[in-house]
Image (cartoon, helix red, strand yellow):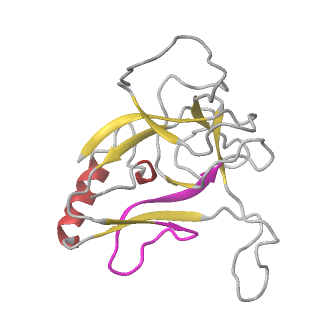
Amino acid sequence: MLLLLGIIGGEHHTHSGGGVNYLCLPLNPLYENYKDGSQNSGFMYGTEYEVNTFNPFKKNLHENGAPYVVCFVKSQSSMLMMPTRNVCPSGWIEQCHGYLMSGHHNHKKGYEFVCVDEDTEYVPGTRGSKYGALFYPVGYRRTLWRTPCYPYIAGREPTCAVCTKGPKNAVALEVQKKIKTEKKVVTCDFFCSPDLT
């Protein structure tokens, strides 16, 4: 079931302070106590895709704003983001699969790793470099335990999958099919809503 639509926000990639994670911002914010203008505090910027050197996705996402959607899967009670694998463990239901993304390694701002669906969308009308938080594909480094026991290939972009598990996986399969057929403007990027209870 679709709960919320919005955009992904984050601190500017050149700032050394402020928040470190991406946030999912609903399109209908509520304000309580506030003071207009800059308060010398943390900042929130929109997030755009930076995939000009390599775009593993099905659409041209470069410099477009990143949307989000929160979906509720009633019959699932556990969620697992599987980095480096685009399939789920046996007994788990795949909600989406794609590629790991994060901030650029050379920017001042650090971000969490997130799994972005391979068929993800962008916010219409946002083309152009204007956002402060940025999504970059992640690549393995050659120093990542390069031994015969570890199969991480330097420079290769790791895949990922978001998996759920609960007492009624058969029902969840129907929910999954419905979610995939209803993807029109945005996709179900479950990293924005880890609580599926």
The C terminus lies in which quarter of the figure? bottom left
> What's the residue at 45%, 71% (across, down)?
87
Q: Outermost residue toward the top?
A: 36
Which residue of the protein is positioned furthest toward the front in this rendering? 33
Vertical position of residue 133 compared to residue 88: above or below: above
Residue 114 image offset from top left, x and y in percent: 55, 54
| Magenta residue span | 81-102
| Magenta highlight on residue 10 | no
Q: Is residue 59 left or right of residue 16?
A: left
Q: Is residue 170 left or right of residue 122?
A: left
Give the x, y percent position of residue 56: 60, 53
Q: Nearer the viewer, residue 47 or 182?
A: 47
Say which residue appears at 65% left-offset and 38% top-offset.
134
Location of residue 14 by image quarter: top right
Q: Residue at x 78, y 66 (%)?
A: 141
In the image, is residue 181 above or below residue 7? below
Residue 188: x and y, percent? Answer: 38, 49
Q: Using the rendered view, name the quadrant where residue 13 is placed.
A: top right
Q: How many marks?
A: 0
**Up-down relation of residue 20 to residue 45 (above or below):** below
Q: Nearer the viewer, residue 25 or 36?
A: 36
User: How far across and down, in percent of the image, does residue 142 sit?
Assistant: 81, 70
State the residue in front, 79 or 146.
Answer: 79
Q: Is residue 132 above or below residue 138?
A: above
